[in-house]
Structures are given as structure tokens and as C-alpha cells.
Image (cartoon, rainbow, N blue to C red):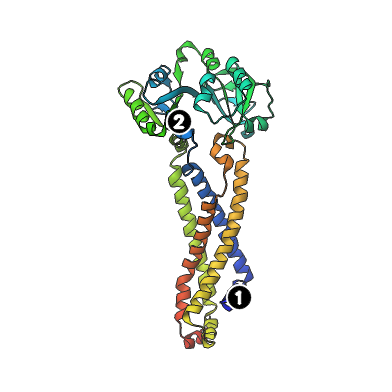
């Protein structure tokens, strides 16, 4: 067995240039595949937090860009199983300029309710009270405050687009979050009073905390049934589903990621098959020599497959290393705070294992047919070969 392993390793480097190019091409492909799978995992496979599993979001059934009447909140609060209802309004706008490094999520919320349905946020009590009592105050995540070099009592100006005007705000609190995202909240009452009378009394979304996980499906159905006959209908869904519906504005992201993964896998298979086929054709005489030395068909098949699997695994390891570097770069890209899921984008063990397994399987699959054919060739035909 050791003799076969030594022969496999030596054969891998018999044509150094071709092996190097094969490993590099495999590495780049596995890198792309790994990053895409990591994004897929971050978007669709991560379980919600304890608090996130108890939160629902109610929005306009027609579109996320359309608002709901504010009085819906009072009716939602009366639904059995509902613990807290708060309004969150996407603000948009601009801070300093529109460059990516100054892009982050901005929300108007109700300070007295925000920390009731977002219990995972950690903010000192004195800062929380300062935020509640200051109509022009705002709070920011620690990641955002560090990026923008903000300190408590700093003043900033937001220039509105959806809600035109200049909004002068004072930093009253810096809070920690499990997702390490970059976003801020300011007092919705300040926004409401700045609007023309005709635009007041509307809400972007209602964020709802329910009593238990068992209440989630019942509350979802009850809220939407309540407004089924209303001029403005609602769509209530879990917080994770709401985020995915937001991502869906970019298109069918799931199908897009899976189709690219399939295309990359097929491309790797073609490249590997071509390389291995060339290698086997060049070694037909060598196979004949090995048979004269007593190597069996199974041994020859194992040697060729082992060579293919080794080269593929080397490309897989290189690809995962490149994917990890690329994922680290994505974490620090300007504007990534809009998607907190990407702030901790990493090549998790399941993704790494799947990539390595695919690399090995592709190497074996691409080598099997030429290796099987080579192992069955007769000694006479092998030695007569002019390849």
C-alpha cells in the first residue's frame, strides 16, 4: 500500500506544469463554489436567534415600499398571543455623502418599545433612558459607531429622500448586537412631526413579539385574516422570512446561487476529465510495463484514481484557503452593514466539508472512465501503443 502511495505522489508531479495549472484551475473554481455556498448558508440555513424566532413582521401585502395605517398596530396588539407591537420605518436618506463607506441602515422606531421586542440588544440603562427622553436622539450599533468614529453626544445630520428634509440627531446610546451589524435607530415621533399632515399616521412595518413559538403560526394567520377585507391588506411573516423577501427584490437569489454552483461544478468536471484523459493516454505503455511487473487491474485503477483524487484534493484545499480570504474581504466591504448576515460570513465546516467532498468526487468521476479503460488494456496492446 505504501509503495502504491509513493507511486501516486510521484505520478502527480511527472508533468509539473500541467499539475500546477490543474490545481490552480480547481482552486479558483472551488473558491467560487465555496463563497457561493457560504452566502447560501448565511441567507437560507442559519437558524434564528431565541428572540428572532419569536418576532413577526407585518407589512403591506402588495409591496414592502407601501405603508400601512398606523392604527393597525392597536388592532394587532389585541390579537391573542401578541406580547408587544412596535413600528419600524425604513428611513433611507444620506449621511455625509452617498459613498459606500457612509452607507448603513437607518430606521425610525418607538424608543419605549424597541428594546421590548428586540431584547437581544444590549444598551446601558442610562443611555436607554437618554434615548427615550430625547426626541432628536438616536442610537447606533457599536460596529457602526466605531466605523464612523462616533462618541456619545456627537451630532449628525441625515438628509432625507423618502422623507425630505434635514434631520439633526444626537447620539444618545451605543448598543451591542449578536449580528454585529451596522445600523441606527432614531425617534419615530421626530420623523412624524416633520412630515406634512397628509403623510402622517402611516407605518412602514409592525414588528411583533409573540408569547411563544407555538403562537407564531396562529398569530400570523390571525393578523392577516383581520385585515383581509380591508382596503390595505397585510402580509405577516417571520423575521427571517421578511429578510428573505427583502433580498428577493434582487431576484430569485436561491435559484441564482444554485445555478451558478451547478455550472461551476460542471466546469470543474470538464476540466478535470480532459486533464486526466490526457495523462492516461500518455501513459498507456507505462500501464503495460506495470502489468508485466505484476500489477493487477485493481492496483492500476487505484493508482490512476488516487492520482486524480490527490490533485483534486490539493485544488480543493487551495480553493478553500482562497475562499476564506475572499469571505474575510466581504466582511469588511463598505456597505455590507445593510446585510448583517454577511458581517460574519465565513467558510463554516459543513461548507468546507462539502467543497472538499465535491473536489474529490469530481476528481474520481473524471478519472474513472479513462482509468478503467487503461486497467483493462492488454499488455501487448499497451506496449504497442505509440501515445
**Of 342 and 288, the residue lying toward us:** 342
Q: Nearer the viewer, residue 273 or 325?
A: 325
SS for callout 1: helix
Q: Position of residue 99 (x, y in %)?
A: 63, 32
Residue 150 as seen in the image, left or right of residue 288 = right
Q: Residue 296 at what x, y percent from top left?
A: 49, 82
x and y percentages locating residue 350 in the rendered image: 51, 52
Q: Which residue is mark 2?
A: 55
Residue to which mark 1 is pinned = 6
User: Does residue 123 appear to the left or right of 359 in the view shown?
Assistant: right
Real-space CA distance between mark 1 and mark 2, rounded to the nearest whole angstrom = 58 Å
The image quadrant that residue 220 belongs to is top left
Q: Residue drawn at (50%, 84%), measured in percent from left and top?
A: 382
Crowd class of label 2 (few under 14; some 14 to 19; many from 20; radius 10 Å): many
Task: Give the secondary structure at mark 2.
Answer: strand
User: What residue is at 47 percent from the left and 55 percent from the top?
Assistant: 263
Amino acid at each position: 500500500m505504501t509503495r502504491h502511495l509513493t507511486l501516486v505522489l510521484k505520478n502527480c508531479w511527472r508533468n509539473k506544469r500541467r499539475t500546477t495549472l490543474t490545481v490552480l484551475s480547481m482552486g479558483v473554481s472551488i473558491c467560487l463554489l465555496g463563497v457561493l455556498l457560504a452566502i447560501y448558508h448565511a441567507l437560507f440555513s442559519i437558524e434564528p436567534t431565541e428572540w428572532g424566532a419569536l418576532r413577526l413582521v407585518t407589512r403591506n401585502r402588495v409591496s414592502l415600499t407601501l405603508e400601512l395605517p398606523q392604527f393597525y398596530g392597536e388592532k394587532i396588539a389585541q390579537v391573542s398571543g401578541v406580547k408587544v407591537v412596535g413600528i419600524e420605518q425604513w428611513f433611507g436618506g444620506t449621511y455625509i455623502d452617498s459613498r459606500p463607506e457612509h452607507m448603513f441602515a437607518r430606521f425610525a422606531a418607538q424608543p419605549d418599545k424597541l428594546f421590548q421586542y428586540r431584547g437581544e440588544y444590549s444598551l446601558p440603562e442610562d443611555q436607554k433612558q437618554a434615548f427615550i427622553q430625547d426626541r432628536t436622539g438616536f442610537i447606533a450599533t457599536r460596529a457602526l459607531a466605531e466605523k464612523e468614529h462616533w462618541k456619545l453626544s456627537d451630532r449628525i445630520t441625515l438628509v432625507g429622500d423618502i422623507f425630505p428634509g434635514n434631520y439633526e440627531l444626537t447620539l444618545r446610546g451605543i448598543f451591542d448586537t449578536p449580528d454585529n451589524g451596522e445600523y441606527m435607530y432614531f425617534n419615530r415621533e421626530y420623523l412624524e412631526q416633520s412630515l406634512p399632515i397628509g403623510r402622517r399616521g402611516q407605518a412602514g412595518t409592525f414588528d411583533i413579539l409573540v408569547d411563544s413559538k407555538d403562537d407564531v403560526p396562529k398569530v400570523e394567520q390571525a393578523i392577516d385574516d383581520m385585515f383581509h377585507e380591508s382596503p390595505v391588506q397585510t402580509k405577516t411573516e417571520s423575521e427571517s422570512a421578511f429578510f428573505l423577501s427583502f433580498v428577493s427584490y434582487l431576484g430569485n437569489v436561491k435559484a441564482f446561487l444554485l445555478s451558478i454552483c451547478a455550472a461551476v461544478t460542471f466546469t470543474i468536471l470538464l476540466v478535470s476529465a480532459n486533464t486526466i484523459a490526457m495523462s492516461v493516454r500518455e501513459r498507456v505503455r507505462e500501464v503495460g510495463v506495470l502489468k508485466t511487473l505484476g500489477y493487477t487491474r485493481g492496483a492500476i485503477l487505484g493508482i490512476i484514481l488516487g492520482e486524480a483524487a490527490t490533485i483534486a484534493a490539493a485544488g480543493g484545499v487551495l480553493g478553500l484557503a482562497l475562499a476564506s480570504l475572499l469571505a474575510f474581504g466581504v466582511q469588511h466591504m463598505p456597505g455590507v452593514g445593510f446585510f448583517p448576515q454577511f458581517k460574519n460570513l465565513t467558510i463554516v465546516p459543513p461548507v468546507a466539508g462539502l467543497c472538499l467532498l465535491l473536489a474529490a468526487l469530481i476528481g474520481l468521476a473524471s478519472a474513472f472512465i479513462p482509468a478503467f479503460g487503461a486497467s483493462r488494456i492488454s499488455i501487448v496492446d499497451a506496449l504497442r501503443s505509440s501515445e
